[in-house]
Image (tube, helix red, strand yellow):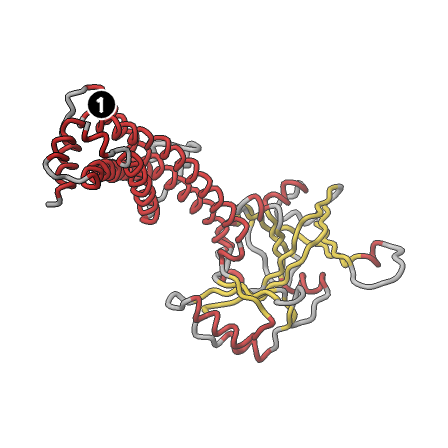
Amino acid sequence: MNFSLYIAKRYLLSKSSNNAINFITIIAAIGVVLGSASLFIVLSGFAGLKDFTLQFTSIIDPDLKAEASTGKSFVISEDEFSKLNNLESIASFSKIIEERVFVTFEEKSYTSAYIKGVDQHFEKVNAIDSVVVLGSWLTQKTNQIVSGWGIANTLSFGVLDYGKRINLYVPKPGKGQITSAKQAFNTFNAVNVGVFDVNENLNDKYIYAPIDMARALLGFDENEVTSLEFKLKEEATEDQARTEITSVLGDKIILKNSAQLNDALYKMLNTENLAVYLIFTLVLIIALFNVIGSMIMMILDKKSSLKTLFNLGATIPNIRNIFFLQGSLMTIFGGLIGLLIGCIIVWLQKTFSLIMITQRLPYPVTLKAENLLIVFITISVLGIIASKIASVRISKKLVSI
């Protein structure tokens, strides 16, 4: 066995004759254990919150979405439509027409809504029916719409109220003097048959409508769409689907997956996760100052033993390596114990819902191997640096006096 490692293990496991040093060492070890456990628990909590947040957007997000590479819309020919239907990787796809609209109901108005015209295949691509909390999904070739909860709440309308129509307005393109609202806007009177609830952003944004209604309201041509949404077959890969779709539609479209469609949300969640990691890493660094202090105290306590080792032929690098290895082992083993405690706490929360956000909603946590690796690497690197700082205090003058 390596000489320095053997002595380091003996020093790590043995008690000092000075109770103050023993106490300081125990405090340092507890700090490492609690620091690594806390960091892992917090990262698991944020991973759970991230999964909990993204599950709502993923409900109505397609596997892939084709958007116009230039402008707001593009034309899909009958030949391209037929080829897309025969692609091996595509289970189904839906034509989409989307644009901003002005909505009024009785005396109230809403200016930040978007109409999303969908065809009969939309329910095969997205599980939209699972988020319709009031009423039902719309029927094609009608004047029915399904609104977000936020829009319905703001304008105070319900479902299936045929006596009170919802008015949708879109500005007409063109030039010249406008003398009436009829000249300025394309309008459509609709009946709300359902209300969906996904998240605040989508609830306040979208009104779903039959694609024919959206086409007439916006003045689009028969084969003109703003996007196509695709659902992939289970055995298909994203790369395979991208290649096949691009081979049909060429460079007139840009393909985006779920993460790219929600890039702002992903960036926000990742930034928050990074900020919390850095804050708790700073706390961990402060805790490791105790390790440096306990190592220096141990060096002073073992001064006579170190002198003996030096006289017996041990070099200064050998002696430094003893305390470097001792501090490294303390932080690594402390980190592993902390990770074990953290895993147990996260498992208990996941299994028994110890902490609740509401009466029915437990605080979400997720056990991820990458978080285990991140915490272990962090504690190991910081522990090695702290041990190195402490061990370099040993000099020839110290062991020879």
**Which quadrant of the rendered structure holds the N terminus?**
top left
Q: Is residue 90 above or below residue 22?
A: below
Amino acid type of the residue tagged 1 in the rendering: Ile
Residue 344 visible to the viewer: no
Q: Nearer the viewer, residue 183 or 238?
A: 238
Residue 218 spot, x, y in % from top left: 71, 62
Q: Callout 1 environment at 10 Å: few (<14), some (14 to 19), or many (20+)? A: some
On screen, residue 56 versus residue 12, left or right, reads right
Which quarter of the figure has residue 253? Answer: bottom right
Foreground pick, 189 / 394: 394
Residue 306's x, y, as percent? 16, 31
Q: Which quarter of the figure has residue 304?
A: top left
Residue 39's place in the image compared with 125, above or below, is above
On screen, residue 193 versus residue 313, left or right, reads right
Mark 1 element type: helix
Query: Which x, y percent locates residue 125?
Result: 49, 62
Count of picture labels: 1
Identify which residue is drawn at 38% across, 41% down: 43
Asked if 125 appears above or below 37 in the picture, the reply is below
- What is the x, y in percent for residue 72? 66, 64
- Closer to us: 99 or 247: 247
The residue depicted at 39 percent of the width and 65 percent of the height is 234
Question: Label 1: which residue?
Answer: 21
